[in-house]
Image: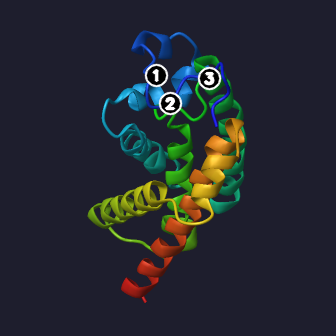
Amino acid sequence: MNEPNQKSKRDYQPPPRLIFTTWQHLLAFWFGAGLSPRAPGTMGTLAALPLWFLLRPLPLEIYLPLLAALFTFGCWVCGVSAKRLGVHDHGGIVFDEVVGLLVTCIPLLPALRIASGSWPWQAAWAFAAFALFRLFDIWKPWPIRTLDRRVEGGFGIMVDDLIAAFYAAILLWLLVLITHP
């Protein structure tokens, strides 16, 4: 599936200093979280949690358009980074995981008044969102795996995580409803 001039995403590890040479790589690798030698997607998702807590207080009418803008921007920045690396969807490109976590956390927004509570409860729900998103992102149930294999470019990098996030958000929303009737 790789073009002749593209490197295999499993074999190619960009030097860390390269990631810090352009702001596009820096964001695509989420400030270096994607450089983790083990589970860079998990590390990128973990590194997105502070952003979630920063954006959490936003009203829904600001949060949702911001997510749309981040997704659109992510298509561009991940595409640029992948093209410069010569590797489609390199494992270290984790901006898609950042946006995925933010989408997964939609049911936890205070504006929705579904899941509320003290700091320990907020942290527990954020961890649940993290775990569910990682589950769907790794498992890749239909149509995620198909999209991951067939859709190229920045949109291809972002869209499979978006759908994994939707699956995770639906399950998270159901868990919240069951535990907080």
Q: Residues within 10 Å of mark 1 (few under 14, many from 20)?
A: some
User: Which secondary structure, mark 1?
Assistant: loop
Is residue 136 positioned above or below 93 on the image?
A: below
Q: Tell me the number on the disc at residue 12.
A: 1
Type of amino acid at the residue the image marks with label 3: Gln
Residue at coordinates 40% horizontally, 15% vertically from top-left? Answer: 16
Residue 26 as seen in the image, left or right of residue 64: left
What distance separates the C-alpha of mark 1 from that of mark 3?
Answer: 10 Å
Relative to the observer, which residue lies in front, 3 or 32? 3
Type of amino acid at the residue the image marks with label 2: Lys
What distance separates the C-alpha of mark 3 from that of mark 2?
Answer: 9 Å
Residue receiving disc 3: 6
User: Which secondary structure, mark 3?
Assistant: loop
Placement of the N terminus among the 4 image quadrants: top right
Type of amino acid at the residue the image marks with label 1: Tyr
Say if mark 3 contacts mark 2, CB within 8 Å. Answer: no
Relative to the observer, which residue lies in front, 7 or 98? 7
User: Which secondary structure, mark 2?
Assistant: loop
Q: Tell me the number on the disc at residue 9.
A: 2
